[in-house]
Image (cartoon, helix red, strand yellow):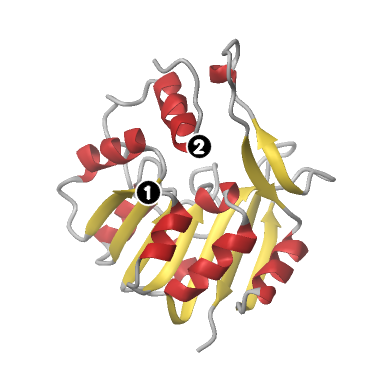
Amino acid sequence: MPLAPHTPAEYWDLYMLHRGEGEQPAPAVNRFEWTQYPGHGPGAEMLGEPRRALDLGPAEGKEAVYLAQQGVEVTGVDLSLIQVERARRWWDSVPGLDFVHADACDYLASGTQLFDAVYSVWGAVWFTDPEQLFRLVAKRLTPGGVLAFSQAEPLPGAYGPQPMRGKWLEGREHELTVLRWQYTPEAWADLLKQHGFTDIQALVLEAPEPNKLGTLLVQAHTST
């Protein structure tokens, strides 16, 4: 196991090693899930009917697989090489599906292919400066295309970039602090408007059980 992470990619690779999930069987895929509670909340309809979709931070790739099984061409871009290699092993027989090892912003900035939908399920949107990310996403969406993402609801007063740490890093000589961007739904809507998005819906979906963590859900469109 590496002694200490020095980049975000190493951070996530070390996290995967800590969880020890590399050799687990592929999970079942029967629904597009935006929240951490199976069967709770909306599904793939938040993306409309895309022909091509981009998954930013797919992790195990379940949502990307679900869309590909519906005939959507899906590219999943993840910063962790371990997660990308695992997803490729699990889903190599699924047509129309590709997993790419890259930083989300680097991938968006370096390519020209347009997507009808760009989405992130507790993924890269949470861990990327939106001032940089939203500008790049807007350039890679078709007219009228959809950007949708979910993440944990923000804690009151904990807005903007917030440090994330993990027990798998304790006791190490060097520790990288990874940031997560958290805002109120209203603040997310304002940020998206500033980058040219329209028809924005941003809300916190309450958990199905009391005293559980809710989910921030955001959907926006590019101009037609």
| Residue 52 x %, y % | 32, 70
Which residue matches tag 2? 8
In the picture, which quadrant includes the N terminus? top left
| Residue 18 visible within the image | yes
| Rendered position, 141 above or below 38 | below
Q: Position of residue 56 (x, y in %)?
A: 44, 54
Mark 2 residue type: Pro
Q: Nearer the viewer, residue 217 or 22?
A: 22
Q: Residues within 10 Å of mark 2 (few under 14, many from 20)?
A: some
User: Within the image, what quadrant is residue 87 found in?
Assistant: top left
| Amino acid found under the numbered disc labelled 1 | Ala
The residue that appears at 63% across and 74% down in the rendered structure is 195
Viewer-proximal residue among 193 and 66: 193
Residue found at x 27% / y 24%: 23
Label 1's element?
Answer: loop
- Residue furthest to the bottom: 224
Q: Secondary structure at mark 2?
A: helix
User: Which residue corresponds to the image point at 50% horizontal and 48% vertical from the top-left?
Assistant: 123
Residue 153: give x, y in percent of width and height.
Answer: 69, 48
Residue identified by numbered label 1: 102
The answer to which of marks 2 and 1 sits earlier in the sequence is 2
Q: Do the residues bearing badges 2 and 1 touch, measured as CB atoms within 8 Å?
A: no
Residue 41 visible at all: no
> Can you give x and y, in whole percent of width and height, for residue 6 in the image?
51, 29
